[in-house]
Amino acid sequence: MKLLLILLLILTATFSTKAQTNNSPYSILGIGDIEDSYFGRTTGLSSTGAAYRSNINIINNNPASYSALEKQFFVGEIGIRGTFIQYYGSSVDPLNNTSFDITFKRFVIGTKITKHWGSSAGLMPYSSENYEFNSLQPVLGTIGETINANSTGYGSINRAYWGNAYEFFHHLSLGVDASYLFGSINQKTILQNPTSYLSTNTNTNYNSFYFNYGLQYYTKVTKKWDFGLGATFANKTELNPAYSIVILAIDSSQLYSLPQPQSNFLLPVSYTIGISATKDKKYTFLADYKYAGWSTLNYSGFNYALQDSRRYSIGFEISKKKSAYNSLFETNYFQAGLYYSNSYLNVYGQPILDMGGTVGFGINSKRTPLSYSATLQYGVKGTESNQLVQERYVNLTIVISYRDIWYTKGRKFD
C-alpha cells in the first residue's frame, strides 16, 4: 500500500508538471495524434497483442485478456515515455529541427475477482495535440500583402476505463472496456506586424462514453504448441465537442468572446484481429491487423481529409522461466516487433504513413513484488514530398509493475 501511495504521488506530480516541448506537426489536424501504444507488456512487440494473454501483466490490447490474470492476484502498473524527434522537409529550419519530451502515459490496476472473472481499471491517453510553427498569411482585401502568424496547439483526450473479462470452458474469454473519454484541446494563432496584433484562442472540450468489446480463443495444439485468436470491436461513437473562441487585441482586451455552436465529431467503427502461437511456453509469435473506418464520416478541412486507417504489426517474444513450488516463474523476457500503418489523415492528397520497429527487455524481481521493462522504438512518420514534414523519432518506454497476492483471509479459489 505504501508503494501504491508513492505511485499515486508520482502520477499526480507528473500530471502537474509534464512537459509540452515535443512538437508533432500532424497533430494540428483532426483530434491530434491517436495513440497506438498501450505502454505496457506489448510495447516491445510493436503493440501487437490482440491474442496475447498474460497471468502477471495487464494487457490492454484486448479486454478479454483480463481473465488470464493469476488467481488471488493484484497488479498495478505505471508507464513513462521519453521521445526524441528530428524533422525533415523544405519548411523545416535545419538549425531548429529537434524536440524532446518525457511524459507519463499509463496508470492501471487489475485483479482476479473470481476463478474466471478478471477486472482492470486505469487511465491512459487516447490522443494528443502539441505543435508550434510560424508562417506568413495573406491579408484579406489586399494584393500580395502578408502578415506574420504564430500558431500553437496543445492538449489531449484521455481515457479512463473499467474493463471486465470472463472465461468460458477454459478456452474462450469475452471482455469489455467501458471508457470515459475526456479532455480539451487549445489552439492559438497570433497575427502580428509592426502596426497590428490579433490573437485568436480556440478551446475545444471533449467528453463521451466509449465501449470496446473483446474476444479471445486459446487452445493447445500439440504438447509443445499453444495457439490463440483475438478480436476487438468498437462501434461508432459521438465525441460531443464543445467549442469556445476568444479574440484579443494588443492590450489583451477582448474583441470577441462567445461559445461556438456545438457540432458533432464521431469516432468510427474500428476492429482488430490477431493471432498468437507459443512454443514450449517460451517462444511466442504474434501478428495483428487493426482497422478504423474514418472515411465514412466524411470529415475534411483545408487541404486535408480523413481516410481509413490500417495498422499491421508482428511481434516475437522469448520468455525465460524457472520452476518453483510446482509452477513456472518468469524471470525475464526479450521482445522485438515491426509495424506499418497509415494514419487517419490525408494531407495534400498524400497519406501519412508511419513505420518502424521495437526491441524490449523485462525483468521480474525474485525478492520484491516489482518488475521492470524498457522498450526502445525507432520510427519514421510522414514524408518530405508536397512540402510536408517527415518525423524520425526514437521512443524509450519504461514500465514499472507492482504485484501481490490479494487479501483472501486464508481462502483460495477452487
Image: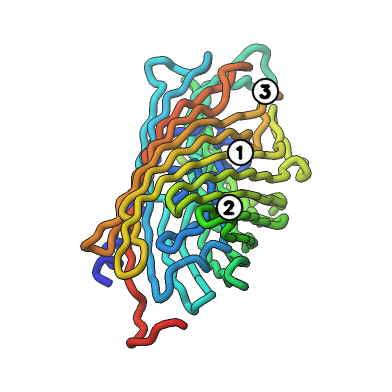
Is label 3 in a helix, a strand or a loop?
A: loop
Q: Dot 1: within a 10 Å radius of its alpha carbon, few (fewer than 14), some, or many (20 or more) residues?
A: some
Would residue 369 be found to the left or right of residue 68 on screen? left
Query: Where residue 310 sits: x, y (%)?
Result: 66, 39
Point 30% across, 65% down: residue? 324
Query: Where residue 71 sits: x, y (%)?
Result: 43, 74
Query: Which label sits on residue 140?
Result: 3
The image quarter in which residue 255 lies: top right
Query: Where residue 231 sits: x, y (%)?
Result: 65, 55
Q: Dot 2: within a 10 Å radius of its alpha carbon, few (fewer than 14), some, or many (20 or more) residues?
A: many
Is label 1 in a helix, a strand or a loop?
A: strand
Front position among marks 1 and 3: 1
Front position among marks 2 and 3: 2
Query: Where residue 301 sits: x, y (%)?
Result: 70, 34
Point 28% across, 60% down: residue? 370
Is 295 above or below relative to 303? Answer: below
* Sooner in the amino-acid sequence: mark 1 or mark 2: 2
Farthest front residue? Answer: 223
Which sits in the foreground, 86 or 265? 86
Say which residue label 1 marks: 312
Quarter holding the N terminus? Answer: bottom left
* Sooner in the amino-acid sequence: mark 1 or mark 3: 3
Point 40% across, 37% down: residue? 359
Is 38 above or below relative to 300? Answer: below
